[in-house]
Image (cartoon, helix red, strand yellow):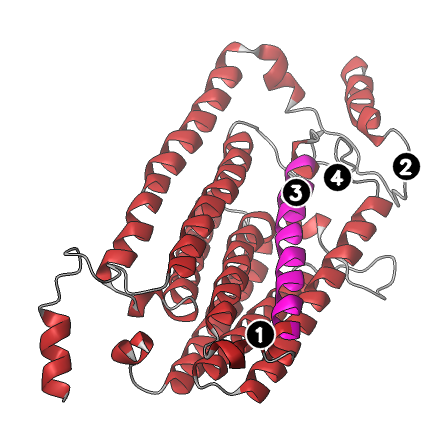
Amino acid sequence: MSNVTTASTKEAKWWNGGKSPFDVEYGKVMMWYFLMSDAFTFGAFLIAYGTVRFSTNGWPNPNEVFKSYPFAGEGTNAPLVFVSIMTFILIISSVTMVLAVHAGKMMDKKGVVRNMIFTILGGIAFLSCQAWEWNHLHHEGAWWGMNPFINADGTASTTNFTNFFFTITGFHGFHVFSGVVINIIMLIMTLLNKFEQRGHYLMIEKAGLYWHFVDLVWVFVFTCFYLL
Amino acid sequence: MSDNTHEHGDPIAEIKKVTIILSALTIVELILGFWMIGITSEGMRLAVKGTIVILMLAKAFYIVAYFMHLKHELKNLIMTIVVPLALFIWFITAFLSDGNSFRNLRNTYDPHFKAQSTIKVEAKEGHHGEEGTKEAAPAKAAETEKK
């Protein structure tokens, strides 16, 4: 049997018609193409940010700007602490999403439900962190068009820093929000046995692709704004 | 299902492995980030930033290849995704060098721009919901200029 399968995959003529040349269903290919276009949108944002930063002499120090965390006192100086928590929340929720996809492949409804709940909770936790951070920065006087932070070299800064920060993290946060909504819909459909009736959990895989993409974008946003 | 034809090893073991790699890469990134706070040498900072970018790309690879399962798809599908994304190489090179060139040009030919970016301003203490902070910074800069 194994002989036959290896022979057929090796000599398969993927473009001769009669089968999908990508060997995945239509929806998944389209999800990949959508994510590719989204990658270009985020890429354009981040490259615009990089270009403006390269064309400016001074820039605020992220370790000065992002140095607080919830329930911390006034003079807290803890750079990178809060954002590392946010990063790990998103990585862990990505892992539970992979586990949900895997459970779906095994037709294990219980596993899908459990891991989808964890993923949704992770997404909500991330959004709450971001809401706190935006609120905190807003209280410090930062918003679109307002930048209270001076440059790292002590010179006056422009509003480019806050404009890019709020636009890009906002656009990413909106993606996280849509991801949570999609995941909740997937959870409800699982609980209603929709996928059991269809005989496959391919929808969970597509939602999973979207969720991993959100995590992927955060890898870039996190590095570009908080580390560099 | 067609998925079974390209199933490979133990998926749970692979997920665990990738989770550990991603966490390790993030921790190294954070250590470098903390370390960079104390570094003042411009060349050294650039080297650390370069390392962070490489680690970032490694993380991106692991997420796309294993979590998004792209590594185990057919080569046709991988190519249709990865080849267009190669545009980013041009995109990043062209735009960042353009930004850099614009800064150099302004520093050379625009004395006002150059002067503006060398004036020191005082950090505002306890800025809480200040109104019109946007205007505050240039006003202060102008003040120092007069002195």
Asked whether the beta carbons under mark 4 and mark 2 sit within 8 Å of each other, the answer is no
| Closer mark to the observer between disc 2 and disc 1 | 1
Precedes in sequence: disc 1 or disc 3: 1
Residue tagged by mark 4? A149
Amino acid on which disc 3 is placed: Phe
Numbered mark located on residue A92 in the image: 1
Q: Are marks 2 and 3 on the same chain?
A: no
- Badge 3: how crowded within 10 Å, few (<14), some, or many (20+)? many
Disc 2 marks which residue? B130
Sequence order check, earlier mark of 1 and 4: 1
Q: Mark 3 points at which residue?
A: A165
Check disc 4 and give the amino acid type. Answer: Phe
Question: Residue B131 or B125: which is nearer the viewer?
Answer: B131
Q: How far, Cα to Cα, is label 4 from label 2?
A: 12 Å
Residue B57 belongs to magenta span = no
Q: Do labels 2 and 1 share a chain?
A: no
Residue type at mark 1?
A: Ile
Q: The magenta stretch spans which residues?
A: A163-188
Q: Earlier in the sequence, mark 4 or mark 3?
A: 4
Disc 2 marks which amino acid?
Answer: Glu
- Position of B46 relative to B22 (above/below): above
| Magenta span includes A185 | yes
Q: Are marks 1 and 4 on the same chain?
A: yes
